[in-house]
Image (spheres, rainbow, N blue to C red):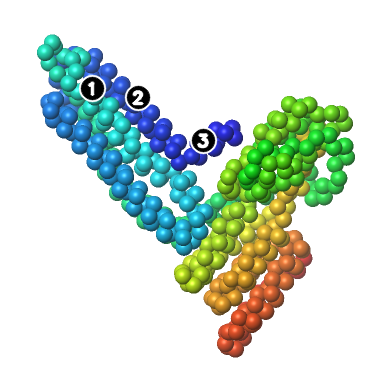
Amino acid sequence: MGPLRRIVERFWFLPGVMCLAAVALSELLITLDTHLDEPVRSSWSRVLFYRVGESGTRDILGTIATATLGVAGTTFSITMAVLALTSSSYGPRLVRNFMADRANQMVLGVFVATFLYSLLVLRSVGGSGGVPEGGSFVPHLAVNAAIVLALANVAAMVYFIHHISDSIQISTLSGGVRTDLHRVIDRTFPAAPPGDPSTELGDPPLPLRARVTAREDGYLQVVRHQSLLKLARRQGFEAVLLVRPGQYVMNGTPMLALHATRDIEPDAVDKARRLLEIDNARSPHQDIDFAVQQLTEMAVRALSPGTNDPNTAINALDDLSSGLATLASRPVPSGVLRDEQGVVRVRLDVPDPVQIVTDVLDRLRWHASASPSVMHAALTLIERVGARAHAPALVVALTSQIGLLRDAFVTAGHHAHDVDRFDLRAVSVSQNMPHC
């Protein structure tokens, strides 16, 4: 399912499927038109269909094809220009969200499929199929379907203008990344993690027999855990992941250590390698750090001199606090996967919530110290995460960050009044931290 998932997520996949559907529809309706008797065709067309001659049919289909392709090109050219401006302000990685948007894919598919459908129907006009000798064939069913598709294109264009105007708003961009963050948290830190409840992995009891190394450079995107578990059970080895999704690997980098009581077949090593997907870009599918990084980058970029938009940074921090608070409330998985007999088969490299939260607050301290409103929002983030935190190490880290933020605020040279207000807020947040 790994390669299939990659294909399905490509921007061209849905438009390609719709183009194939347009080819099938055109052939079906032309064939149906060809085999309809003239009395039946005339009776149906008087009641249901708009009927024109050969010349009018060519004009209609040509107009639809030309207009559709022109509108598609113009619309998406404007969209890419707007997207380029937006990504330069809030981060180039947001282009991925546009490419993965099913609505954008559907609208492009409607335009391109209508263009292709009109061309295929146009080529059949003027033939002799299904008409008396000396007559001209006009596929009335197919032509009327093209008119319906043209109306659908108008609706798609109106919808797309609304959708793209909404999708470039900061609240929509930030909300989309927040949704990705919650999804990857649910996958990586489930509310009821399966497997061994212990968080202490210990050393693998079996001797090392083989290492699975990368065959290309890139980011580890996906680890197919269940498939790896089944392979380890069949082959009788224990797999220890040496990297986790989001980390960059180079050709020859060890990614997986295989431990067993006997030698492992090379074929099993190759199968294990295929269960670790590498690509040129990071993905939020299993990479929790990437989703967190996107929201953090959005906040930091909003504070750059060229943008200077503290409200956008606060919006990003609000969405970030939603995800980090959920993360803080979840138990840390053991990273141990067992088979049906309870034998440990896979040991995962589990992300550290303390490190994730600390990295976010460090970056905010470095870049936001000159903005009082954003620094107050950082304290609010700590307060929200701390209210849901259960791990003592996370509470200690959050408490430490309060002091670091206070020091950075004072060092930034703010007015004494602003410093006093920040001190009061920092003391309040510190007092409300849970005591684990």
* Badge 3 element: helix
Left-right relation of 400 to 291: right
Say few, some or many: other residues with alpha carbon within 10 Å of mark 2 (under 14 / 14 to 19 / 20 or more). Answer: few
Asked if residue 305 is positioned above or below residue 173 in the image, the reply reads: below
Task: Name the residue located 45 percent from the left edge and 41 percent from the top edge.
Answer: 11
* Badge 2 element: helix
Residues tagged 2 and 3 counted as in contact (Cβ below 8 A): no
In space, the residues marked 1 and 2 are separated at their CA atoms by 14 Å
In primary-sequence order, the first of circles 2 and 3 is 3
Residue under label 3, please give it: 7
In primary-sequence order, the first of circles 3 and 1 is 3
Q: Residue furthest top?
A: 133
Q: Which mark is residue 24?
A: 2
In primary-sequence order, the first of circles 1 and 2 is 2
Residue under label 1, please give it: 124
Task: Name the residue located 81 percent from the left edge and 32 percent from the top edge.
Answer: 237
Q: Residue furthest bottom?
A: 416
Left-right relation of 338 to 128: right
